[in-house]
Image (spheres, helix red, strand yellow):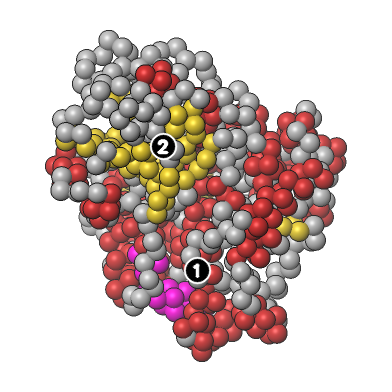
């Protein structure tokens, strides 16, 4: 049943009503001993009263916890944190800020839950890979979780058509990306935490939750050499946190620089066996397979290399996009994701890794968002170093064919973030490739198969966000876009994590580690991005780890042909999807228009407008309609202490 294959945790108030809410979730057997219990894949950490505080189903991640008197700390992350480390974090931390300073030493892929000085607070990661949601239960008050579907189930929250319509766009910018798919369920912003005050003595209800900011991006001050050293250390630490000590691991080795980097970083942890998986491309001009083979040859040439197995999946065995759309019901993502039409391809690769005996799989997701550098950053550079900014931008302009005067106009534009949001969606055609991209984000076209109702919902959401004077992630335009792109990519990677959980194979993207993000943002812009060098920061960070011959690659393959061909190969599945469309039932899409497009897969409409987000919305909605089973067990009242 969809929903059961997901890991999750829920944070509950110390009350009879909170205990009752826990009974609606899969939980340990009530006969378990009064200690930390892991029964039936569920772990319960209790309040001092013995009532459930944190109920978790950690299918992949590890739960580490420690209590000292009334203070407690729970970390949910890629590996178990030793008790001595937990004690060092908790003891001596008088307040939230003190604990955060200590937490900065850990690789940044943990959910943090703490009870300190009478206050409970929760946070995810700055990268957005780990998020926090909260909702108000009619009896228990505020409850929180890392999964919005869990909160929707517990509170009976209905779906929100406005949020669903937004997800039919390819890119959902900050702050609209925080719009949860269920009414009454709220997402805490990445870089922010959620404080849950307790009820005052003699009162029945606690005050409402409040958000606080715990993370700020570092200033871009480091020279390339120092920044590269920090980045290399952060990548190595994140890889060790995921796979350190495991004997059999796997990596997706596409042949690109990002996957090659993680292959050699994984190799450095000295596993007994390392399986590398490459999907051959159908495009005869593709270079990825050649570079993947070269990477394997370089790795095998080193005396200390672990046993390497290189699995090349023939191109004719790799599914096209939009294959086996019905299988997306195996996972309930937090939201519809545009990568969903590629699920069959991802499932094949992860299935092969699992069959090879891998205990953990690494991917290079996040590398493009972090290291390619988006043109918007030249807006930031122009403020402090206009000559360098124009020199770099001129090189980029000639590569992309940007006309001189529009580029100058875009560079000098000082429009506000709310003004950008108000005009970020349009009924006009997509901007041409020669349009300079130096604003707060991209401008998107509403799809011709969207209904007037959907268009009205989408434009109203953008205008409302603008009218409410939405604040950017950072006051600098380029930095805002960089961080937003990383967080968008982290959301998309969730789909890969959930497929891995379905198969039984943990999947990780170490580039989404907060320490990696911080190390990247700390480097001077002129050093971090360049029109004449490919991912210069990553290249310098990996010298001595990745052979120089592999760091010399300056090209990147794309898979657009597989997507377009998938529209033809799987036209019957797409037609079946629009027959009885749930999105159409909600008045969001014109099913007849979509049926015509399914019969005309090479229509100019589909060349100009991607359909992947609409497909993702349809498949997600069908899964979400019946995503949670009825409760059948009651919680234990075990105490979490060591």
Image location of residue 246, percent across then percent down: 26, 40
Q: Is residue 395 left or right of residue 44?
A: right
Q: Is residue 127 above or below residue 122?
A: below
For this orientation, the residue located farthest to the top is 31
The residue drawn where x is 65% and y is 83% is 408
Please identify the quadrant where the C terminus is shown: top left
**Magenta-drawn segment:** 519-531
The image shows residue 499 at horizontal and vertical percentages of 49, 36
Quick one: label 1, few (<14), some, or many (20+) residues within 10 Å? few
The magenta stretch spans residue 528: yes
Pick whichever, 587 or 304, lies toward us.
Answer: 587
Q: Position of residue 504 (x, y in %)?
A: 41, 31
The one nearer the camera, 278 or 62, is: 62
Disc number placed over residue 475 in the picture, else none: 1
Nearer-N-terminus badge (1/2):
2
Residue 634 in sight from this viewpoint: yes
Tag 2: Cα neighbours inside 10 Å, few (<14), some, or many (≥20)? Answer: few
Q: Secondary structure at mark 2?
A: loop
Mark 1 or mark 2, whichever is nearer to me: 2
Please give the name of the residue rendered at 50% of the width and 68% of the height, measured from the top-left corner.
475
Q: Depth check: give the residue in front, 149 or 416.
A: 416
Q: Residue furthest bottom?
A: 387
Please state the horizontal and vertical placement of residue 184, each as a whole percent of the image: 56, 35
**CA distance for labels 1 and 2:** 32 Å
The residue located at (55%, 85%) in the rendering is 390
Circle 2 is placed at which residue position?
207
Which secondary structure lies at badge 1?
loop
């Amino acid at each position: 049943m969809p929903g059961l294959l997901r890991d999750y945790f829920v944070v509950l108030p110390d009350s009879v009503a909170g205990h009752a809410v826990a009974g609606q979730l899969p939980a340990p057997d009530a006969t378990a001993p009064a200690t930390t219990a892991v029964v039936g894949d569920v772990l319960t950490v209790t309040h001092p009263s013995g009532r459930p505080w944190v109920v978790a189903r950690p299918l992949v991640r590890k739960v580490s916890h420690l209590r000292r008197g009334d203070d407690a700390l729970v970390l949910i992350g890629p590996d178990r944190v030793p008790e001595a480390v937990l004690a060092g974090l908790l003891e001596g931390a008088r307040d939230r800020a003190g604990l955060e300073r200590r937490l900065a030493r850990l690789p940044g892929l943990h959910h943090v839950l703490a009870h300190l000085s009478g206050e409970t607070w929760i946070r995810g990661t700055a990268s957005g890979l780990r998020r926090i949601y909260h909702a108000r239960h009619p009896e228990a008050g505020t409850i929180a979780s890392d999964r919005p579907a869990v909160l929707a189930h517990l509170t009976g929250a209905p779906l929100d058509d406005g949020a669903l319509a937004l997800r039919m766009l390819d890119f959902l910018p900050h702050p609209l990306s925080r719009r949860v798919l269920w009414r009454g369920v709220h997402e805490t912003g990445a870089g922010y935490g959620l404080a849950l005050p307790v009820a005052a003595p003699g009162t029945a209800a606690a005050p409402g939750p409040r958000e606080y900011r715990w993370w700020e991006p570092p200033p871009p001050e480091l020279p390339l050499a120092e920044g590269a050293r920090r980045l290399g250390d952060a990548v190595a630490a994140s890889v060790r946190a995921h796979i350190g000590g495991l004997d059999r691991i796997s990596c997706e080795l596409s042949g690109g620089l990002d996957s090659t980097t993680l292959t050699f970083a994984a190799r450095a942890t000295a596993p007994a066996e390392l399986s590398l998986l490459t999907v051959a491309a159908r495009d005869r001009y593709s270079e990825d397979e050649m570079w993947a083979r070269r990477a394997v040859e370089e790795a095998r040439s080193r005396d200390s290399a672990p046993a390497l197995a290189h699995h090349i999946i023939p191109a004719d065995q790799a599914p096209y996009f939009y294959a086996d759309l019905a299988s997306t019901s195996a996972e309930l993502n937090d939201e519809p994701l545009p990568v969903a039409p590629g699920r069959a391809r991802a499932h094949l690769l992860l299935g092969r890794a699992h069959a090879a005996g891998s205990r953990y799989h690494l991917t290079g997701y996040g590398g493009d968002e972090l290291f390619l550098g988006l043109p918007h950053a030249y807006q930031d550079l122009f403020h402090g170093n206009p000559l360098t900014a124009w020199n770099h931008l001129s090189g980029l302009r000639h590569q992309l064919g940007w006309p001189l005067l529009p580029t100058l106009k875009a560079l000098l534009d000082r429009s506000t973030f709310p003004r950008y949001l108000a005009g970020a969606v349009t009924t006009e055609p997509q901007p041409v490739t020669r349009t300079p991209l130096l604003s707060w984000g991209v401008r998107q076209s509403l799809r011709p198969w969207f209904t007037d109702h959907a268009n009205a919902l989408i434009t109203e959401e953008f205008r409302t966000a603008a009218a409410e004077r939405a604040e950017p992630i950072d006051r600098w335009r380029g930095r805002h876009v960089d961080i937003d792109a990383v967080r968008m990519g982290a959301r998309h990677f969730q789909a890969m994590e959930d497929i891995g959980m379905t198969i039984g194979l943990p999947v990780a993207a170490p580039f989404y580690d907060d320490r990696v993000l911080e190390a990247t943002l700390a480097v001077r812009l002129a050093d971090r991005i360049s029109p004449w060098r490919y991912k210069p920061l990553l290249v310098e960070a990996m010298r001595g780890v990745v052979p120089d011959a592999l760091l010399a690659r300056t090209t990147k393959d794309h898979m657009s042909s597989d997507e377009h061909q998938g529209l033809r190969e799987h036209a019957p599945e797409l037609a079946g999807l629009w027959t009885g469309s749930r999105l159409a039932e909600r008045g969001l899409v014109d099913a007849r228009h979509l049926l015509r497009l399914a019969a005309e897969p090479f229509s100019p409409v589909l060349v100009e407008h991607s359909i992947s987000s609409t497909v993702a919305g349809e498949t997600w909605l069908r899964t979400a309609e019946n995503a949670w089973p009825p409760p059948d067990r009651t919680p234990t009242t075990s105490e979490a202490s060591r």
